[in-house]
Image: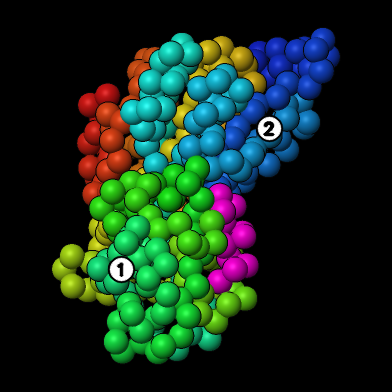
Amino acid sequence: MRVIPHAAVAAAVCAIGMQAAYGQAIVKIDGSSTVYPVTEAVAEDFQKAKKGAIKVTVGISGTGGGFKKFCRRETDISNASRPILKQEMEACAQAGVKYYELPIAFDALTVVVNPKNTFVKQLTVEQLKKMWEPAAQGKVTSWKQVDPSFPDAPLKLFGAGSDSGTFDYFTEAIVGKAKSSRGDYTASEDDNVLVQGVSRDVNGLGYFGYSYYEENKSKLRAVPIVNKSGKAVAPAASAVLDGSYNPLSRPIFIYVNEKSMDKPEVKEFVAYYLQHGARLAAEVKYVPLPARAYTTAAEHLAKKKLGTVFGGEPDVAVTIDSLLAREAKL
């Protein structure tokens, strides 16, 4: 049986009092569809633990869309599948929004094909770039154009929408520049739409967070990616942990509005997230961070260490160890 500290009891009583006086206390979250499975799992557990005293809403408008709402003070927490970018930092600064950056897990960004595709055994970064770079628009329309050994079958692409952090990360890692992509593909910030697209098209290829692949692996096939060492590596927790699934392994985050932490319901939820996030990240098939990462995040909150360790730049070479080293210096 878990012992609840007196401070937590007092906060819970306060939250219930707020509910009685003003209606149900609400924690508002929006942003990345990649981070959604983790945050939704935490939200469900938290709401059960609070017995309905606090409601947590979790939207999916993509990392970019989530930051727009966050910097307009429409949400308390923003799910993000990449670090906050310079223009988002500036928008938040202009609105007077300060924030805590809390890494909560690692993801293996997964490239998938239809299970009936028998010819793609692995793909290189160069092959993926040939498919997705802006110059491919209207020109690279067949699998055979990607590799002469592939059949002359139509290339049907499904990928993240432009408000998605996954779009930013994938284009940076594969094309070499964030947001640099062909536009003639089926795009969505909702990864479930992409899952359905690839699963219904024998010539389809798409990309999204590992959790969505794991949840739908009976109707998708993950493609091993050739890393810089020349080894074809399939997405898996072990490959993220040992750094071999680069450049497509990445940290995922929640960003918390500093002012929102003054609200007991938000403070309780974030504390619950850091306490239970590792277990729930593993449940939804992401890679939990080492325990010290969540301890460091809690210390940043306690010491009011605001801001980002990424400087507003996309970064595709982050390993778990390098992330922890950055966090330690904040």
Amino acid type of disc 1?
Answer: Lys
Rendered position, 255 above or below 126: above
For residue 81: magenta? no
Question: x, y (%) of residue 58?
Answer: 64, 38
Q: Is residue 166 visible?
A: yes
Along the line of sight, which residue is nearer the eye, 219 or 15? 219
> Considering the numbered disc 2 on the image, is that residue within a helix, a strand or a loop?
strand
Q: Is residue 249 visible?
A: no
Query: Depth check: 41 or 77 in front?
Result: 77
Disc 1 secondary structure class: helix
Residue situated in front as seen by the camera: 11 or 208: 208
The circle drawn on residue 56 is 2
Residue at mark 1 to residue at mark 2: CA–CA distance: 42 Å
Identify which residue is drawn at 47% across, 29% down. 255
Pointer 1: residues within 10 angstroms few (<14), some, or many (20+)? some
10 left or right of 114 in image? right
Taking the spot 41% from the left edge, 27% from the top edge, the residue there is 88
In the picture, the quarter occupied by the N terminus is top right
Q: Amino acid at mark 2?
A: Val
- Which badge, 1 or 2, is on the more N-terminal residue? 2
Q: Which residue is mark 1?
A: 130
Q: In the image, which residues are magenta?
A: 188-198
Residue appearing at x 44%, y 44% in the figure: 165
Q: Position of residue 34 (x, y in %)?
A: 51, 49
Q: x, y percentage for residue 228?
A: 18, 65
Main SS class of the magenta portion in the image:
helix
